[in-house]
Image (tube, helix red, strand yellow):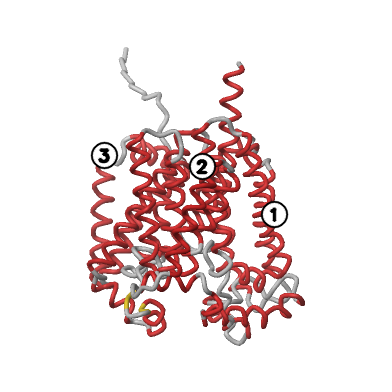
Amino acid sequence: MFNFEINIDSAPKKSFFSLLWQKIFEEKLNNSLGIFFLILCSGFIAAAISFGGIKIGGVLGALLIGSPLIIASMFNLKFGISFTIMLSFVFLGAKRILDDIPLGILMDVMIVVMLFGLFIRQINERDWSFAKNPISKIILVWILYNLLEGANPWAESRLAWLYTVRGFAGFTIMYFLLMYAIDSKKFLFLLIKIWLLFMTFAMIYGYNQEFFGLLPFELNWIMADKGRYMLLFQAGKFRMFSFFSDPLVYGFSMCFTGMLCFILAGGPFRLYKKVFLYTLGCLMIYGMLFSGTRAAFILPPAGFLFYSIVKFKKNILITGGVLFFIVMILLNIPSSNPNLVRLQSAFKPSDDASYQVRVRNQKFIQPFIQTHPMGGGLGSVGEWGKKFSPWSPLANFPPDSGYVRIAVEMGWIGLFLFCLMLFIVFKEGIKDYLRIKDPMLKTISLGMLTVVYSLTLANFPQEAIGQYPINYLFFVAIAIINKCRQFDTQTENSLVQ
């Protein structure tokens, strides 16, 4: 009698969150919500700049750019590692321009985010084989000891420990991220290319500073602090630092990368690549002189000696003898060149007043180290010591050495663990090098061993390993040493099958 047509939509209504997911991720904000969001962000940034100045705008811009990069790093460890290493090259140099932007926190966030991403992967994969080797185990012990220092009964400030452990444990964790992410020769080669590319940029910029002078903002940065000026202006000229934090980092970086280029040039490459690597190595070793870092000048002959002993071939030993003869001439020839004079003084420590001061400081602090097995606590020496515990005698103590700093802050136990870590790296690394059959991997392994050896020596007269980008490259080299043997074994197994 009555004909009712009732249309009922059987599809259930979407929840607020599922609708939001659709608008943001499925439609990628290509809708009215996206337009509204962009207008809102633009208004917020404009208001922030008008009230807070251009620096606030810079921070907000960095957040807009950095947030996607951080999220991408969580889901793609290879991208995150590559980006973090590239950032470490310009990190401290950029602070000369962007002094108020907390770039250090960005580096810490990158490490934490990538570590979180690794743990998320392991929920499904449950494969920790990359951490089950002697080097990984001792590095894990080193990280745990850094964390244990938070309970050091002799520490003057827990806050200093918190600020310091971010760096100490942070860049050490990079090793485990590398061990997981380096799953192919392709990515291993990519890391080496990034290393050489950014060091080439640093070398070119250092040459530009040496021959064309420092830029106005660099001169202003030097003149802003009397101590900095006295450190960088010596023997009538400025010590060059490229885009790194100081001449020390520039000098050491040019030195060990130059040696790496020489060693890689001896590998199975085409002629033009060999010529390029030899040329790059020579330019870097010469560029090292611009830094005026005397401790770096000793490393090339020491590194070549290590290379010759491990390689132990007749032609290498003969070449070493010729180079030794040339070096002896350079060290004894009269010269008015300030770079050469500084090079000669590096091999005469008895005539160096600063070296004698270091020796006296080390003797002075020995009783403290002997009676404090866990040291005075992380951050008790140097910048953080002056900030968080200025009343402590350690706050104004100049360690002038990576090993002395470890001994003072972490005690003789910490120094023993660090030296044990280095011993295991060399023991396992040299053993693996002798077993590797692949000529390319063998060359890379020896090159990285030489880098680690050079930095081990450099850490005695200076605090070499703890500064960007050297701190990351140190563990990149250790991870590559570990991976070379693994890839070689995989190649052998594939050939057998």
Is residue 240 something one can see in this rendering?
yes
Is residue 111 something one can see in this rendering?
no
Contact between marks 2 and 3 (CB within 8 A): the answer is no
Q: Which mark is residue 10?
A: none
Snapshot quadrant of residue 210: bottom left
Q: Identify which residue, 474 or 329, lies in the foreground.
A: 329
Categorize mark 1 by other alpha carbons within 10 Å: few (<14), some (14-19), many (20+): some
Categorize mark 3 by other alpha carbons within 10 Å: few (<14), some (14-19), many (20+): few
Q: Which mark is residue 315?
A: 2
Cα separation, mark 2 vs mark 1, equals 41 Å
The amino acid type, in three-letter code, at marker 3 is Asn
The amino acid type, in three-letter code, at marker 2 is Asn
Note whether 325 is above or below 376 in the view shown: above
Contact between marks 3 and 1 (CB within 8 A): the answer is no
* Left or right of 64 in this view: 375: right
- Residue 88 rendering spot, x and y as whole percentages: 42, 57
Badge 3 marks a residue whose secondary structure is loop
Contact between marks 2 and 1 (CB within 8 A): the answer is no
Labels 2, 1: front one = 2
- Please identify the quadrant where the C terminus is shown: top right
Badge 2 marks a residue whose secondary structure is helix
Cα separation, mark 3 vs mark 1, equals 50 Å
Q: Residue furthest top?
A: 1
Q: Which mark is residue 30?
A: 3
- Residue 221 rendering spot, x and y as whole percentages: 32, 76
- Residue 467 rendering spot, x and y as whole percentages: 49, 63
Q: Identify which residue, 25 or 184, lies in the foreground.
A: 184
Mark 2 / mark 1, whichever is N-terminal: 1
The residue sitting at 46% across, 47% down in the picture is 81
Cα separation, mark 2 vs mark 3, equals 66 Å
Q: Identify which residue, 38 or 4, lies in the foreground.
A: 38
Mark 2 / mark 3, whichever is N-terminal: 3
